[in-house]
């Protein structure tokens, strides 16, 4: 299975703006789903749909309670399926985090590296190295690979530019 990140448009099979009912049906094709705060647009308690595949998870954020606003893909675990998550041909979870950021910067993209988190504000991509279990570590003592990537709509991480 290949999942392509296409910021700010979404990910394979899940375009941003997709209605909640269609999203739930498509997510159920990946595996079991859990719906939290169905229909809610309340800040910090907005609707989320979790697609729970035996080898990975995707968290779909529906901040308005009706349509897909962002998709967060978690690193695939070993198993029977070959699962690859790519951005512009690069495997984002099998390329060491610091190497990935270097490759993205070499493409002329704005990369904000905060060690455990990295953001591409112009593209609305956000990465995390935070892991809740043991993973291979890089020389800086942090996870060697990113553990999750979020694709959001235009402007999703642009506030980070003002912080710098």
Image: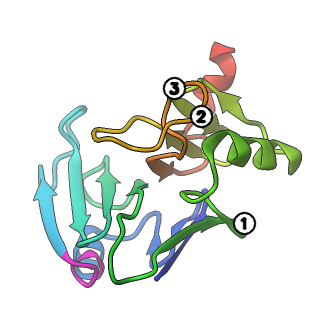
Above/below status of 51 relative to 1: above
Q: Position of residue 38 (x, y in %)?
A: 12, 56
Q: Residue at x 27, y 75 (%)?
A: 27
**Which badge, 1 or 2, comes first in the chain's sequence?**
1
- Residue 15 shows up from this direction: yes
Q: Position of residue 60 (x, y in %)?
A: 32, 58
Distance CA(mark 3)–CA(mark 2) = 16 Å
Query: What label sits on residue 118 in the rendered view?
Result: 2
Q: Residue at x 46, y 83 (%)?
A: 1
Q: Magenta residues, as a range?
A: 26-31
Name the residue tied to disc 3.
141
Q: Residues within 10 Å of mark 3 (few under 14, many from 20)?
A: few
- Using the image as rendered, state which of residue 43 and residue 81 is in the foreground: 81
Determine contact: label 1, label 2, CB under 8 Å.
Answer: no
- Residue 122 shows up from this direction: no
In the image, 27: left or right of 4? left
Q: Circle 2 sits in a helix, a strand or a loop, which is it? A: strand
Q: Position of residue 63 (x, y in %)?
A: 31, 46
**Which badge, 3 or 2, comes first in the chain's sequence?**
2
Query: What label sits on residue 88 in the rendered view?
Result: 1
Q: Residues within 10 Å of mark 1 (few under 14, many from 20)?
A: few
């Amino acid at each position: 299975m290949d999942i392509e990140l296409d910021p700010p448009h979404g990910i394979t099979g899940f375009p941003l703006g997709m209605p909640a009912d269609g999203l739930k049906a498509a997510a159920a094709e990946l595996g079991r789903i859990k719906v939290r705060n169905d229909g809610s647009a309340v800040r910090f308690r907005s609707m989320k749909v979790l697609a729970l595949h035996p080898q990975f998870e995707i968290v779909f954020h529906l901040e308005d309670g009706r349509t897909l606003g962002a998709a967060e893909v978690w690193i695939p675990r070993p198993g029977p399926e070959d699962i690859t998550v790519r951005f512009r041909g690069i495997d984002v979870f099998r390329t060491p985090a610091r190497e990935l950021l270097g490759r993205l910067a070499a493409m002329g993209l704005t990369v904000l590296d905060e060690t455990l988190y990295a953001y591409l504000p112009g593209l609305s991509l956000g990465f995390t190295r935070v892991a809740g279990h043991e993973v291979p570590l890089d020389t800086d003592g942090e996870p060697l690979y990113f553990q999750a990537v979020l694709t959001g709509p235009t402007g999703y991480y642009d506030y980070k530019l003002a912080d710098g």
